[in-house]
Amino acid sequence: MSVNEMFSSIQEFLSADHDVREDIRKVVQVLEQTAREILTVLQSVHQATGFKDIPSKCLRARELFLTVRNHLGDLKTKFPAEQYYRFHEHWRFVLQRLAFLAAFVVYLESETLVTREEVAQILGIEVEREKGFHLDIEDYLSGVLTLASELSRLAVNSVTAGDYTRPLRISNFINELDSGFRLLNLKNDPLRKRYDGLKYDVKKIEEVVYDLSIRGLSKVQESETAYEK
């Protein structure tokens, strides 16, 4: 093979690779738009009136996740399954965002931590690497850490909305989450940095709970709730 022929074949490879990446980018852009729509729906729970309408907002988010499933199904067809990690960087951020949104929906519905399997089911993708397009465990963990930051904000806003018991429940949840992460020996630098931020979320929520305790608001609301029952 001559030098010209060799470089011509390289150019063909580069052109084909570029086309694949462009196709992936187009689908990822649509995914990012849908993720923003879901986030807009869920962000409204931070408003004073948002706490009264959480079920309907979660239902709307679930409907939008059906659109996400379709887009991810389209994304799977844009590259060979065995080359997942070759192109992973293109959808890594949006998949982490979607994992967070799925975790947030599940928390709002049941105040429990979503599992990696549940997130994969919501997104319509696999858990096991061998089965193709899957939810990488580090992407799942990154989404969970974003949830912690969102809940620290929710704890503050729930006080503004007059819900004084929610911060206590959030505090218990975040402390359990922190204990779980302490069991992990994280080697991934970006993920490790994200985890380091969890201690600030814990501290922020503890300050909210402490303030409520000093003012006696949480006990007052618990007594009122018990009386109404």
Image (spheres, rainbow, N blue to C red):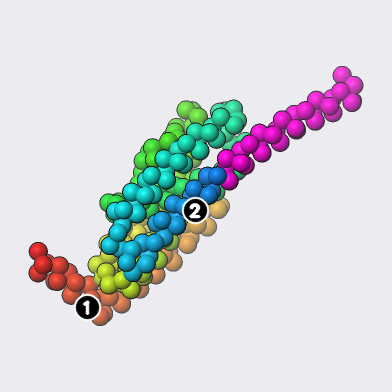
Residue 201: percent from left, percent from top: 41, 65
Residue 49: percent from left, percent from top: 32, 66
Foreground pick, 122 / 147? 122
Give above or below for 175 relative to 127. below
Say which amino acid is labelled 2.
Arg
Q: Is residue 37 left or right of residue 158?
A: right
Label 1: state its secondary structure: loop
Residue stretch in magenta: 1-29
Q: Main secondary structure of the magenta part?
A: helix
Query: Dot 2 corresponds to which residue?
Result: 36
Residue located at (58% from left, 46% from top): 29
Quarter containing the N terminus: top right
Query: Dot 1 corresponds to which residue?
Result: 216
Residue 79: percent from left, percent from top: 60, 30
Q: Is residue 208 left or right of residue 30?
A: left
Label 2: state its secondary structure: helix
Q: CA distance from mark 1 to mark 2?
A: 38 Å
Give above or below for 99 relative to 219. above
Give above or below for 211 relative to 72. below
Foreground pick, 223 / 192? 223
